[in-house]
Image (spheres, rainbow, N blue to C red):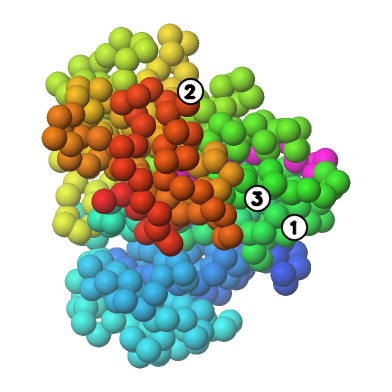
Amino acid sequence: MKAQDLLLQAARQWPRHIAIYDVHGAMTYDELAQTVRRFSRFLSDSGVQPGMGVGVLGDNSRHFIAWVFAVMDAGAVVMPISSQLKAGELADILQTARLHAVIEEKNTALSAQLPVVATEAGWQLAFNSAVDPQQPFAPQASEAALVRFTSGTTGVSKGVILSHASIEERTAAANKVLELGPGDVVVWILQMAYHFVVSIILYLRYGASIAICDNFIADTIIETTNRYGGSFLYASPMHIRLLANDRSDRQMPSLRRVISTSTGLAVADSQAFTGRWGLPVAQAYGIIEIGLPIINLAHAQDAPGAVGYALPDYRVGILDEQLQELPDGETGQLAIRGPGLFAAYLQPPKLREDILQNGWFLTGDLASRRPDGLLTIEGRKKSMINVSGNKVFPEEVEAVLNTHPAVAMSRVKGAPHPFLGECASAEVVLHPGAEVDAETLITYCRQRLSTYKVPQRLAFVDTLPMTDSGKVRRV
């Protein structure tokens, strides 16, 4: 089944059910399906051909959702693009991905780069004259549907190609555990450009309603949840922290499940949220090449630092450097196999079969597993610091530094050391107006970490480089 047919099938099943709540009001499934078909005809009539690559650039909205589905309905391959990107970043995407066209909200940063040929519903279509319209966009992948450019903690981006079949498979696999349906209202805060498949498509496939927040401040999240009876909140650690720090006496009685994604959630933030709202926060391990293979619903309260258990359709391995499985309790490479795997990488072209090793997709994360299967992410393989033979994961040190009341954010990396080989070195951003010296922070770490994990060097900086999806960018 084509990805767009998942929505169209839902519209036939629940035509009058609300698909989207936003600043414009409520939109039913039937109205959303009609909008998708109208946009699809507009694209075809304007010159978009099957096999082309078309970007969708805009803010979170009902129209952003409709355009993504419409591009696929027109037979093209869609690339959701964040409106938060700057002109130079957009130019890099156009050059690297070689998109044939972009449909964008008016007055975005791309408007000056491509000539507009047609407009519809406040959006404008522009073609990239540097790309041959007869050249297929992603010929290396059969039945390509959607491409997402990863923002990458190392700053290296690559287009991940998903087929229609992989979208159908991964949404089905995830909902075996999420169990979302027409009785659910999902409160939406994240950037749709970075979270669309095992989220927006999944919700609409199974008849849930999506309540779109027009910003991500705590007041808006609370108000939106209560106005529409939100039952499911899918958020990032930043949103969890904002809500945990809410000092009002408001409650969100309709909310039944909270899931944190995109990067690791500090245990202190999870506990603070539960203390404020009375709900545990379940961490979810999502990865664009696979979908949502791991989630911590069973032990969100008593093991908030874990990412959880593999979903029923997935198998997880903790591997050594020779790709042999390690015993429970040891830390190794996190490897996953299961349904819905990506089809290929866009640039440079590389098929999934050339990426997998012994059938495993190596995530680049290091993890450990309890005997009962509960998984915890220990850090990134590439960022691990080797201190005289001892492994130090930057994320663990950052988690401690970030609990100091003066610290807003930190980044830890390895630095050369004449005797130890490497040592931990930290960059720290303070909260506005906060004052603390380096020695105080190092002592703070020394009281909470093993000696070899304590930063030997610490510098204060005004900002840290971030990826588009909100992660600290690694060097």
Q: Secondary structure at mark 2?
A: strand
Asked whether disc 2 touches disc 1, contact meaning CB atoms under 8 Å apart, the reply is: no
In the image, residue 135 lies at what x, y percent? 19, 71
Q: Is residue 133 visible?
A: yes
Q: Is residue 31 above or below residue 341?
A: below
Mark before the other along the chain sequence, 2 or 1? 1
Mark before the other along the chain sequence, 3 or 2? 3
Q: Is residue 356 visible?
A: no
State the residue at coordinates (82%, 50%).
Answer: 248
Asked whether disc 3 touches disc 2, contact meaning CB atoms under 8 Å apart, the reply is: no
Instruction: Determine which of the numbered discs, if any, sits on residue 309 in the image.
Output: 2
Range drawn in magenta: 252-264
Q: CA distance from mark 2 to mark 1?
A: 33 Å
Q: Badge 3 is on which residue?
A: 242
Instruction: Determine which of the numbered discs, if any, sits on residue 113 in the image.
Output: none
Amino acid marked by disc 3: Leu
